[in-house]
Image: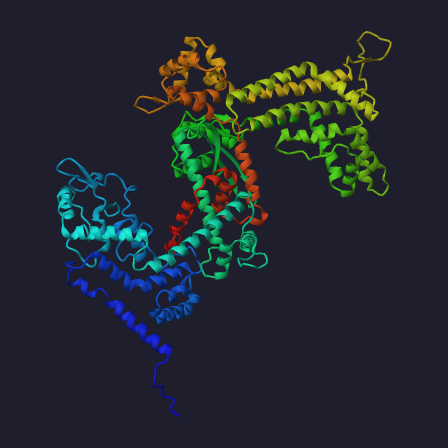
Amino acid sequence: MSDTRKYLSGHDKRKKRKRVEEFIESQRGAIDRFIVKESKNSSLEDLVNEEKQENNDNELHEGLAIENDIEGDVNEIEDNESGDDLDFKNNYSESENDAINEVNEEPSSSIPLDIFDPKNWENLDPKWKDQLVEKGPIRDVLTGKGPKDKSNRRFSSDFYTRILPNGQKHHRDWLVYSQALDKAFCFCYKLFKRGPQPSQLANEGYCDWGHLSSRLKEHETSIEHINYYVSWSELRIRLMKGTTIDHAIQDQIKKAKEHWRKVLHRLISLVKFLAKQNIAFRGSNEKLYDDNNGNFMAAVEMIAEWDSVMREHIERNTHHHYLSHKIQNELICLLASQIKSSILEIIKKAKFFSVILDCTPDVSNQEQMTLVIRCVDVSTSPMKLEEYFLGFLKVDDTTGQGLFEELQNVLKSFDLDIDNVRGQGYDNGANMKGRHQGVQKKLLDINPRALYTPCGCHCLNLTLCDIANSCGKAKDFFGVVQRIYTIFSHSTKRWKILIDHVTVKGLTLKPLSITRWESRTESVKAVVLQAQQIREALLQFAEEKDTDSKIRSEAKSLATFELGNFEFLVGMIIWYEILSKVNIVSKSLQSENMLIDVAMTKIKGLIASFEEYRESGFGQAINTAKELASTMEIDPIFPEKRQIYRKRHFDEVTYESSKLPLPQESAEEAFRVHYFLFIVDQTIGSLKKRFEQYEEYEDLFGFLFTAEKLSSLMDEDLKARCKNLERKLQRKNGTRQDVSDLDGDDLYQELKIIQHILPKETKTASEILIFLQRMNCFPNSFIAYRILLTIPVTVASAERSFSKLKLLKSCLRSTMTQTRLNALAMISIESEFLEKLNYEKLIDDFANKTARRSVFHS
């Protein structure tokens, strides 16, 4: 038999058909370069329908390939195109290995993001045309006036309106202006034209602004424009009703869009949950139903067990599954961006704000500076005082100049005016608070109204550090406390002995914090309240023979010469009282809503408490120590020092003894004078010195602190304080007249009225501000109280952000990028904004990132 075939094989047929189709496609529209087509008897609708009929196959295949899930449904729409479907699928299978794996990569035939700009309407995909036809021209985002041309003329939004002879106004909804091209176009003419048209409004655009009015009148009365406009209106109605000739395809695309939006809604919810709870996303691979694929993939698998949408999505096994780590990062950044935009909107409405900075090294040994903004949220009723986290800044230069430049750059990137800063709060580091080269000095040189406040908690911490380092016995005391913890914690056996003796549940020995002195209260408290049990545990441990002799000697020494010493017990009680008082005030100052006047009251109360403790505290400490000593069977006496004698010189008067004793005070009195009074006086002096800045605030804002202080001022004193505040809030303009945030005379007149109408139940500065918001007729007073409340007290919010930093950038996630770190931190710290996010807007923003994601557009 002959091997010659009578008919071509299927492969040869497909190759031949492909060559023919490519040739036809290359010749399409070639004649349009030589003639101008004028639609006389045929309407635009026929042209559009003809174009849709010719592109049905391309739209069906290209659109559904992008959507990754409905390519197999093409045969159900048009049976006579089955051969083309088969060709498409074969081609798709052959090029499957070359598919794009990066979901964020733009395709070669990507559609411009701004489809509402006429410059992007050439060769526009039919799907995008449908959206433009249905939504019409979008002009609300354009500027009201364009740039001026050589004749000093420009496009104006007034052209959008036509004035009829009777004075009635008619809206030109067909007119659209391209800001990028600085030209005007006819929407329906430009969008639906086929080949070159005689009108500039349909081709390259019209920019002769001097004759635009007459040209628009001529154009809108032409028969071509009217035909195009009528066809546009009819097509838009049919698209809205779903009665177009490609209705079946539109239904398929609509169902696909609904499916993908549901999928993305679930992915966003999953990302929100993991980020909010500080849970890691990825594992060692990104394959579903594989070991170690991470929390994100595992959560997707779990959701698919009961959710039909996610289960269907997984079963399709498409290339673009939107589960990769890049999509995760993109969704994280979208959520964080929405939160940051909301925060910046609040800050800009508030106008006045304070900056709070602090620095710490992360697990990868990079210096991270956190930025927190404090402001009054005027968008709520009643107003609230808020502190918002804006991000971590990786800094290489930690000098005052380097940190200040970083602050300037980030405020500029957020479009926040540094001239609106009214307060700055930092820790007590030299690069921050330095009077000559610190950040606060650099900012004051630019903006003298940015009042600097050292962190109140850091000041309290440094106060304790000052008094502990100024006394040798205090150093010895804290050394003993650390030794007691160390001897038990270095062995599980010893720790078990301690637990067996301790009776107070939840109160165990704790190590001393190197930096946070007020937190040492818990370390001392555990020893004070369990001194007897700890001593018994040490003695038991010292009697065990199978223990190292060095450890036994250490335990016996602590039990006998430290916890068994009455002087140590008295010093322990004194330190516990001092640390407890400071710790209570420090905790209260860490509130986000803490006001400067309340902080001043607490600091004054703390100083008064120590002054009172100086007079009566020693006697109370002795009595408490004696009660403790009796339970521990310790003699309640101070150890007496050996009496010192001096030699008698030859010319001195002769006494019975050859040596004379030096006059000396009792051991108890020496302990009171040289230890108790010394550390209490050091505490009072250090508090007064480190909180001197608060006295300046008292002179500047003191009359606004409470309703009582405001009502007690006489007219002359009130007017003088108002003028002083006006001068302090002035901005230096060089040769121009200085401008202040408020007018002193007007503020004086307003406060005089407020003195008489202020309700009795309104007492604090916050309550007065809420009253002023409700009255809405005292602008200068409103500004003064907003600035007062904006002044920071501590940098506790910045310290709290460092706690999130340790959770997010751990040793297992040390290579995290700065962008991802900031996004996760924003979601975790400002999680209250998550409940206010618009999921539909998030999905639209995600879809606008890449043309391939047009399937997500609603």
The residue furthest bottom is 1
Tell me, yes or no, if residue 392 can be seen here.
no
Identify the residue at horizontal 36%, vertical 60% (top origin): 63
- In this view, 294 is above or below 33: above
Residue 128 is left or right of residue 345, and the answer is left
- In this view, 476 is above or below 149: above
Q: Position of residue 557 (x, y in %)?
A: 80, 32
Q: Position of residue 697 (x, y in %)?
A: 48, 19
Q: Quadrant of the N terminus?
A: bottom left
Identify the residue at horizontal 32%, vertical 76% (top origin): 16
- In this view, 740 is above or below 54: above
Question: Which residue is at the front of the view, 766 or 774?
Answer: 774
Q: Position of residue 529 (x, y in %)?
A: 74, 28
- In this view, 575 is above or below 388: above
Image quadrant assignment for residue 691 = top right
Identify the residue at horizontal 39%, vertical 31% (top origin): 349
Q: Position of residue 453 (x, y in %)?
A: 50, 26
Number of numbered discs: 0
